[in-house]
């Protein structure tokens, strides 16, 4: 039997549900996340965001979660981190750290930080080394094309 993920899902409450839904829908789109579920409960609302059909992040009405949370969304590329930052700022987020390398974490830690409408610190991060990606691309470009068989 396969081991279950260590964390199945996370969630927090927000002070303005509609504003937060617009923010998260726009900010997470460049990372491939979508709003997958939404339902009402006892006069409140909840939306689940995720990938591959599985909600992982739940945003609920009911008042701002305190203290603020910090959540980092993984990314495969630096371009996606950049796109997340731009989309989040356009959607009403506030800059909390422009995209860039954070060598204090490690040499390939590339991240952007944005405060959501309630002040939660939302991050997109990749750990992929640019040099490694370039070397892989060069190696793929050097492979000879498949030879066609003569008839």
Image (tube, helix red, strand yellow):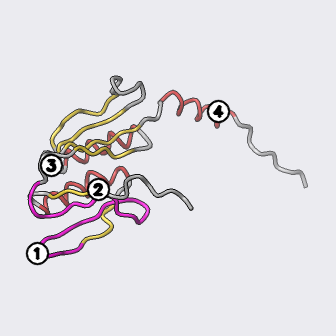
- Which region is colored magenta? 39-64
Question: CA–CA distance between discs 2 and 3?
Answer: 22 Å
User: Looking at the image, is mark 3 or mark 4 earlier in the sequence?
Assistant: 3
For disc 1, the marked residue is 43
For disc 2, the marked residue is 10
- Residue 98 at x, y percent in the picture: 25, 33
Residue 13 forms part of the magenta stretch: no
Residue at 13% x, 58% y is 19
Residue at 35% x, 27% y is 105
User: Looking at the image, is mark 2 or mark 1 earlier in the sequence?
Assistant: 2
For disc 4, the marked residue is 139
User: Looking at the image, is mark 1 or mark 4 earlier in the sequence?
Assistant: 1
Question: CA–CA distance between discs 2 and 1?
Answer: 21 Å
Residue extending farthest right: 151
Question: CA–CA distance between discs 3 and 1?
Answer: 26 Å
Assess whether mark 4 and mark 3 are in contact (beta carbons under 8 angstroms): no
Q: Locate residue 76 relative to residue 47 in the image: left or right.
A: right
Q: Locate residue 135 relative to residue 51 in the image: left or right.
A: right
Circle 1: element type: loop
Q: Quadrant of the C terminus?
A: bottom right
């Amino acid at each position: 039997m396969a081991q279950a993920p260590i964390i199945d899902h996370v969630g927090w409450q927000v002070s303005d549900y509609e504003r937060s839904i617009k923010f998260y829908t726009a900010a997470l789109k460049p990372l491939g996340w979508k709003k997958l579920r939404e339902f009402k409960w006892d006069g409140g609302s909840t939306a689940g965001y995720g990938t591959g059909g599985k909600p992982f992040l739940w945003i609920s009405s009911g008042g701002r979660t305190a203290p603020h949370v910090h959540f980092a969304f993984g990314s495969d590329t630096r371009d996606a981190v950049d796109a997340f930052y731009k989309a989040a700022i356009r959607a009403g987020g506030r800059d909390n750290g422009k995209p860039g390398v954070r060598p204090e974490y490690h040499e390939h830690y590339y991240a952007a930080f944005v405060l959501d409408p309630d002040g939660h610190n939302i991050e997109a991060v990749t750990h992929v080394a640019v040099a490694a990606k370039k070397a892989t691309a060069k190696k793929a470009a050097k492979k000879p094309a498949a030879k066609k068989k003569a008839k």
